[in-house]
């Protein structure tokens, strides 16, 4: 028996009122959805058109254009005399777009380019075999010959996808010269050290661009268009450093390092005392900024090469950092007796002493139970302030320091700029020196500091303070960049000399100049004398109190000339010399003298010889005309002169210079046996 089907439910009738309500709800829902959708669309349009109008344009350009960077040339660096010190040389970087390279050329191209560029064949083949790649670097900054060889191979074989892009390479035309000052750049031509780092933003130019159309697959469409935006070179720097004075300093300093077996490098600085401009600065041994990672010290290099793995890497990095370090501004040292100039200037300026004040040196002095000896055990007896400075007497300056007092001593220490960085426009300057404040200074500390021990300052701080002592008391701001110009040669700015403080009076400065001259004429600085010029200075031989070697010393000397009208100050410090002595007056003073002897005439400062110097250095040329040549040569040699004979005749017909002319001993007199030379040669 079949079950009876359930009756269908009665149909639900919708009233007209319900129908109207449903239609309203439907219309409201649709309207709300439309508002939301259009609201989102409008918000998106607002973002795209108002807040980020360039977004899609950039994305479209990225899809349709290939952007190639044209590196800007880095700005050049010149010395004050116009010597080119750093420049950017045109080079070419070789890149490839493997997917643009025809299949049959993958292996030949890898083989040929690996040979031309001296790169690994297997790696090149692997890179070219990646058929999806559109860019890979083959070699950076090759020379024109190499770039031309790559171009010739591509033309000959119809190879596409090999890109030869113009690039620049930083070069230093003078080689191993001013390395610690100039610094160097990294692989991307960004400054890493020295002036290259300090003025990196200014030296870095604005890169150019080449925009080339490409198709939907990313291939270049050379038949389409390209746009060139020229690169703008960086600014040019002109230094206060004079390349000639720098050469004088580097030559003399290198010779001293070699002769005296200086273990911890040597420092030399030449400063214009009136402006604070640095005319030369060197640390020897130095390095070649063209190859800054090559260790120049043979012993250090051998020690590094003997290591392996991480130990070698750490030793190499440490050695590189050490040779890059500009010791002149980054290291502190005990100035020793050179510092007595500070103590002396302060004592005179306060009136605590005069140049004629008297002191007694018994060879040693006891201060609060601590005995201080005079250098080398000298017993000077009764001496004046001036004599104490000339012979560099420690007991004398301990007594001067006591008269000055610790409060005034510390005040002048700070006033001379010895507590903080000078602010020179070079990176890596040490920010604070090591010194006692008056609240921590007892009689023993005052005694030790008075003659240059127990405090540490930088080499640059020391010469800046000495310049203030002799220039009328003005503490100058040291600087090495004289100015900058844009790529068109238009000046951007010039550095103006800046007076930071008036430390001592002009009267005190004048007295100090006289006392410093006495150090050279009658004291420990006789080796700094330069014929024809009045030179003042001060020697120093300081103990390295923090060294494990009890005999470690720093031999230093500071010289100023002409002392009656100061122009140049020269500081030379030999850190740990191993020679017949460690005396600064014996080892460093001759270096200062050599630099001054060459620099002063070069700057147009004429010598004025004393009668004694005139007789010692010059001779009146004797008359040897008519003499046999052999006899004439002997006669000239008696006067300290050399002969150059022109012609093969037996007798001298004429001579240049003529008889009676004052000639410097060692110079050459030309003896003419032909009678054919121009008499104006004598002029």
Image: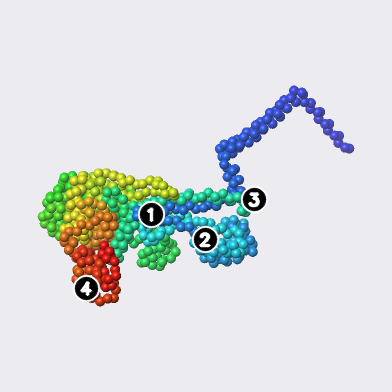
Q: Cα distance, mark 2 to mark 1?
A: 30 Å
Residue beneath the point at 29% across and 68% down:
677
Dot placed on the residue nearer the N-terminal end, 1 or 3? 1
Q: Which residue is mark 3?
A: 216
Query: Which one is earlier in the sequence, the residue at label 2 or at label 1?
Result: 1
Provide the residue designation for mark 1.
78
Contact between marks 2 and 1 (CB within 8 A): the answer is no
Distance between the Cα atoms at labels 1 and 3?
Answer: 49 Å
> Neighbour class for label 3 at 10 Å: few (<14), some, many (≥20)?
few
Which percent across, then down, holds residue 272?
28, 51
Q: Secondary structure at mark 3?
A: loop
Q: Nearer the viewer, mark 1 or mark 3?
A: 1
Q: Are marks 3 and 2 in contact (CB under 8 Å)?
A: no
Check disc 2 and report its element: helix, strand or loop. strand
Measured in 3D between alpha carbons, the distance from the residue under mark 3 to the one under mark 4, in whole angstroms, is 96 Å
Decide if residue 295 is in sight here: yes
Q: Is residue 133 left or right of residue 24?
A: left
Position above or below: 559 against 578: above
Residue at image point 33% right, 50% down = 479
Tell me, what colour scheme is on the image? Answer: rainbow
| Residue 374 visible at all | no
CA distance separating discs 1 and 4: 53 Å
Q: Earlier in the sequence, mark 4 or mark 2?
A: 2
- Give whichever of discs 3 and 2 has the lower sequence position: 2
Residue drawn at point x = 30 percent, y = 60 percent: 248
Q: Earlier in the sequence, mark 3 or mark 4?
A: 3
Q: Nearer the viewer, mark 4 or mark 2?
A: 4
Give the class, few, some or many, for how many residues have Cα within 10 Å of label 1's Cα (few <14, many ≥20): many
């Amino acid at each position: 028996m079949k079950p009876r089907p359930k009756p269908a439910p009665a149909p639900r009738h919708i009233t007209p009122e319900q129908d109207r309500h449903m239609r309203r709800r439907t219309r409201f829902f649709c309207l709300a959805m439309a508002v939301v959708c259009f609201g989102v669309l409008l918000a998106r349009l607002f973002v795209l058109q108002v807040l980020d109008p360039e977004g899609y344009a950039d994305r479209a350009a990225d899809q349709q254009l290939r952007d190639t960077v044209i590196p800007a040339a880095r700005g050049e660096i010149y010395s004050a005399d116009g010597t080119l010190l750093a420049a950017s040389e045109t080079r070419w970087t070789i890149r490839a777009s493997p997917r643009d390279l025809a299949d049959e050329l993958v292996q030949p191209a890898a083989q040929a380019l690996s040979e031309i560029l001296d790169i690994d064949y297997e790696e090149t083949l692997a890179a070219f075999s990646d058929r999806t790649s559109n860019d890979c670097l083959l070699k950076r900054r090759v020379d024109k010959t190499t770039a031309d060889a790559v171009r010739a191979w591509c033309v000959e074989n119809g190879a596409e996808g090999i890109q030869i892009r113009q690039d620049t390479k930083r070069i230093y035309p003078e080689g191993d010269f001013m390395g610690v000052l100039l610094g160097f750049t990294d692989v991307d031509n960004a400054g890493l050290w020295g002036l290259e780092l300090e003025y990196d933003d200014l030296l870095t130019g604005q890169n150019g661009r080449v925009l080339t159309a490409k198709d939907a697959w990313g291939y270049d469409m050379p038949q389409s268009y390209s746009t060139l935006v020229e690169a703008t070179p960086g600014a040019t720097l002109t230094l206060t450093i004079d390349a000639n004075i720098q050469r004088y300093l580097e030559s003399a300093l290198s010779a001293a390092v070699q002769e005296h077996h200086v273990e911890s490098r040597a420092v030399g600085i030449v400063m214009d005392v009136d402006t604070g401009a640095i005319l030369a600065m060197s640390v020897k041994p130095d390095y070649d900024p063209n190859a800054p990672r090559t260790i120049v010290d043979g012993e250090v290099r051998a020690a590094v090469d003997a290591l392996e793995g991480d130990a070698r890497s750490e030793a190499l990095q440490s050695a590189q950092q050490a040779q890059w370090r500009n010791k002149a501004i980054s290291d502190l040292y005990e100035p020793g007796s050179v510092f007595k100039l500070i103590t002396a200037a302060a004592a005179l300026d306060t009136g605590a002493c005069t140049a004629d004040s008297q002191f007694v040196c018994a060879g040693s002095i006891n201060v609060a139970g601590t005995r201080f000896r005079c250098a080398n055990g000298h017993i000077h007896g009764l001496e004046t302030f001036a004599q104490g400075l000339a012979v560099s007497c420690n007991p004398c300056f301990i007594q001067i320091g006591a008269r000055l007092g610790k409060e005034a001593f510390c005040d002048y220490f700070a006033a001379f700029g010895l507590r903080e960085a000078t602010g020179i426009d070079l990176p890596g300057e040490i920010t604070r020196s090591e010194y006692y404040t008056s609240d921590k200074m007892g009689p023993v500390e005052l005694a030790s500091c008075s003659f240059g021990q127990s405090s540490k300052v930088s080499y640059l701080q020391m010469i800046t303070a000495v310049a203030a002592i002799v220039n009328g008391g003005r503490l100058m701001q040291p600087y090495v960049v004289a100015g900058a110009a844009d790529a068109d040669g238009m000046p951007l700015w010039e550095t103006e000399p800046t007076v930071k403080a008036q430390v001592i009076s002009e009267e005190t400065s004048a007295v100090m100049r006289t006392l410093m001259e006495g150090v050279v004429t009658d004291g420990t600085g006789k080796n700094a004398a330069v014929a024809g010029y009045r030179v003042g200075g001060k020697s120093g031989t300081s103990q390295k109190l923090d060294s494990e070697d009890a005999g470690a010393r720093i031999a230093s000397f500071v010289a100023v000339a002409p002392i009656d009208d100061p122009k140049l100050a020269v500081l030379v410090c030999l850190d740990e010399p191993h020679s017949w002595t460690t005396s600064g007056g014996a080892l460093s003073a001759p270096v200062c003298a050599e630099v001054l002897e060459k620099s002063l005439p070069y700057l147009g400062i004429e010598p004025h010889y004393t009668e004694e110097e005139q007789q010692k250095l010059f001779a009146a040329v004797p008359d040897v005309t008519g003499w046999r040549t052999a006899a004439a040569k002997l006669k000239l040699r008696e006067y300290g002169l050399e002969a150059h004979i022109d012609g093969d005749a037996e007798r001298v017909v004429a001579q240049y210079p003529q008889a009676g002319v004052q000639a410097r001993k060692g110079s050459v007199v030309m003896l003419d046996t032909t009678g054919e030379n121009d008499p104006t040669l004598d002029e």
